[in-house]
Image: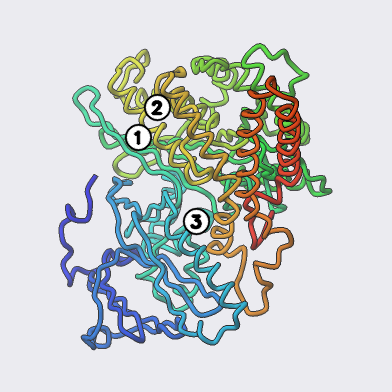
């Protein structure tokens, strides 16, 4: 992939195309202001460091002054107001991730908030403490992974949706073209929009962008896998589950598989999202916290709102539920220890989902117990699922257009897949359906005969699998903080020993992050997405009862480890004297007591959001 050093330099007087935003900017840092000047021949604006006020500048005003630090940045991603002033988010480095159509797609490698908070000296001690916490959240937001953007193309719309809109739309500013659901920094753009700084507004899409190319019949084929995460229920794995009252679900992702061959371009869309019920799964130090359904009179309405939105956007919807059935509903013939750990909780949630879906006979609901049917890492058993839904998948089809922009085929519906996290099992299943679609797409384009498949070529098949493995890892990092599990099933069709070790490390990483870090990360997401608004009248984030109990966890952990160590030592000495026996009983009892105390207070000892909690 190309880096900035590999890119051809832009001419200072090269004009911006209509609807484009500035590709490179000069940032001039004065003692009293920041000046942003487009290097594409566009305009400029200044931000006062005292209070964050915005002022458009003429070219002469932008060039005035010399006592400043000068650097290059690659986009303005927005700004946010806190207690002491404003903070401007800028893209400080980028990477060429590939192209979508004729437009280059960039990955935001690094970002930085510029401080305009001189009023901090006038805050009270409590406000300064709050501001320090908010600033720590901004530093977390700076490290957000999986952010992609283009300077001259709206990346929020898939190819089929974009092709149906009026041609004049591309002359509007990018933020006006965009689908607000998929603009990660939508809330941060408000002040820039109000000041009409359109050419400086850079919409960011969080998700995954992967591309590979190969040859078939001496012709180049390019596959692009582009996923867009929805911002309407943005959050971390354990602190954003299920749906909200509007029907928006956690970890909702639209995935587009784009195929280009000989002037033809085809697009196949799938979506994933948390089970659209009102439910939660609060961390409590256990490896698998018990999910619980929230009783609410609006439950059926929530499900209805969710699927109404899907049908309006994608057409006919087919649901594939990959969760486990309740233990009592089947024999535990595969991995019995694993299913004992489930205690039927996942199955109870699945049963509740299935019961709600009976209220919507027009939506096809298919339950596929992934762990049971594909137990032992047998990826090929997904053929059982495909055989059941093949007719419906083929009826939904895919989108196809020629080099003139003429539409040859439309995708008339979408498959919505889910497990509990909508990560590992979902990614494996979506990759299987995508491979089936890719064969159909290439056959329709003339790159393959009706009897041929990409699986007959190891090189092509491996590239396809690599796309989906990296795609799954990136989405998992964004939601769970760790790499995806079950990557071997996508890459090799079976589980391998190195894959088991990698999955084990990823599972431990998820456990640690979910219990001891994600509460703060959830606060950062709630702050930048606007779910929590900072104001003088808002309550301090430090007023949540029980939050300060978290620092006791390291002490409790040390006592448990020390107690187990001493108990083990005294046990080895029990046979020598009665005193050793008494010591063993005392230390074992103390250790057991601390373990019980920690377990009983697990929820209070975990990292919890301070700003919004569960919404």
Mark 1 touches mark 3? (CB < 8 Å): no
Estimate the x, y position of residue 455 in percent, counting from the top left.
Answer: 36, 17
Circle 2 is placed at which residue position?
438
- CA–CA distance in space, label 2 to label 3: 26 Å
Name the residue at 29% across, 41% down: 403
Quadrant that contains the N terminus: top left
- CA–CA distance in space, label 2 to label 1: 8 Å
Circle 3 is placed at which residue position?
179
> In this rendering, is residue 400 above or below 497?
below
In the foreground, 198 or 189: 189
**Lower sequence index among marks 2 and 3:** 3
Estimate the x, y position of residue 615 in percent, counting from the top left.
Answer: 69, 55
**Lower sequence index among marks 2 and 1:** 1
Q: Quadrant of residue 372?
A: top right
Mark 2 touches mark 1? (CB < 8 Å): yes
Circle 1 is placed at which residue position?
259
Q: Quadrant of residue 212?
A: top left
The crowd level at tag 2 (other Cα within 10 Å; few <14, some 14-19, many 20+) is: many
In the foreground, 378 or 593: 593
């Amino acid at each position: 992939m190309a880096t900035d050093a590999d890119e051809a330099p832009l001419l200072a007087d090269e004009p911006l195309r209509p609807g484009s935003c500035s590709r490179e900017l000069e940032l001039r840092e004065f003692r009293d202001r920041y000046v942003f000047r487009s290097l594409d021949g566009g305009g400029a604006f200044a931000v006062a460091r005292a209070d964050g006020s915005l002022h458009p500048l003429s070219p002469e005003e932008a060039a005035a002054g010399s006592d400043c630090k000068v650097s290059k940045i690659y986009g303005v991603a927005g700004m946010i107001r806190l207690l002491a002033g404003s903070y401007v988010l800028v893209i400080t480095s980028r990477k060429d991730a590939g192209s979508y159509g004729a437009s280059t797609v960039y990955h935001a490698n690094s970002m930085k908030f510029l401080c305009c908070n001189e009023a901090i000296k006038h805050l009270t001690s409590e406000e300064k403490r709050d501001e320090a916490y908010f600033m720590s959240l901004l530093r977390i937001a700076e490290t957000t992974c999986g952010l992609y953007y283009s300077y001259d193309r709206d990346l929020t719309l898939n190819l089929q949706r974009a092709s149906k809109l009026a041609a004049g739309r591309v002359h509007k500013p990018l933020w006006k073209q965009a689908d607000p659901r998929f603009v990660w920094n939508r809330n941060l753009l408000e002040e820039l929009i109000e000041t009409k700084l359109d050419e400086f507004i850079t919409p960011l899409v969080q998700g995954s962008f992967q591309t590979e190319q190969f040859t078939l019949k001496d012709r180049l084929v390019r596959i692009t896998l582009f996923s867009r995460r929805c911002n309407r229920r943005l959050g971390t794995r354990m602190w954003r589950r299920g749906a909200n009252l509007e029907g928006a679900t956690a970890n909702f992702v639209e995935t587009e598989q784009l195929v280009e061959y000989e002037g033809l371009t085809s697009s196949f869309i799938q979506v994933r999202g948390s089970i659209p019920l009102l439910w939660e799964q609060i961390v409590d130090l256990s490896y698998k916290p018990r999910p619980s359904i929230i009783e609410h009179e609006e439950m059926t309405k929530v499900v209805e709102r969710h699927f109404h939105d899907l049908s309006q956007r994608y057409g006919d919807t087919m649901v594939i539920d990959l969760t486990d059935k309740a233990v009592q509903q089947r024999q535990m013939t595969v991995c019995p220890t694993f299913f004992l750990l489930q205690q039927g909780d996942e199955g109870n949630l699945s049963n509740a989902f299935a019961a709600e879906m009976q209220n919507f006979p027009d939506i096809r609901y298919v339950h596929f117990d992934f762990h049971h049917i594909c137990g032992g890492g047998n990826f090929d058993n997904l053929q059982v699922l495909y055989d059941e839904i093949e007719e419906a998948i083929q009826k939904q089809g895919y989108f196809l257009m020629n080099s003139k922009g003429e539409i040859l085929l439309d995708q008339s519906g979408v498959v919505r897949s889910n497990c509990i996290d909508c990560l590992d099992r979902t990614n494996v299943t979506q990759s299987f359906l995508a491979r089936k679609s890719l064969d159909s797409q290439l056959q329709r384009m003339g790159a393959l005969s009706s009897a041929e498949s990409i699986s007959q070529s190891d090189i092509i098949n491996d590239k396809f699998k690599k796309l989906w493995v990296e795609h799954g890892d990136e989405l998992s990092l964004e939601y769970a903080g760790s790499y995806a599990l079950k990557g071997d099933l996508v890459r090799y069709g079976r589980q391998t020993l190195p894959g088991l070790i990698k999955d084990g490390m990823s599972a431990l990483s998820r456990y640690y992050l979910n219990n001891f870090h994600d509460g703060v990360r959830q606060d950062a997401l709630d702050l930048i997405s606007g779910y929590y608004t900072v104001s003088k009248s808002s309550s301090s984030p430090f007023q949540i009862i029980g939050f300060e109990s978290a620092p006791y966890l390291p002490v409790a952990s040390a006592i448990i480890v020390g107690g187990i160590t001493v108990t083990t030592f005294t046990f080895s000495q029990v046979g020598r004297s009665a005193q050793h026996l008494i010591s063993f009983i005392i230390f074992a009892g103390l250790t057991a007591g601390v373990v019980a105390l920690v377990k009983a207070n697990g929820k209070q000892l975990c990292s919890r959001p301070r700003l919004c909690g569960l919404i």
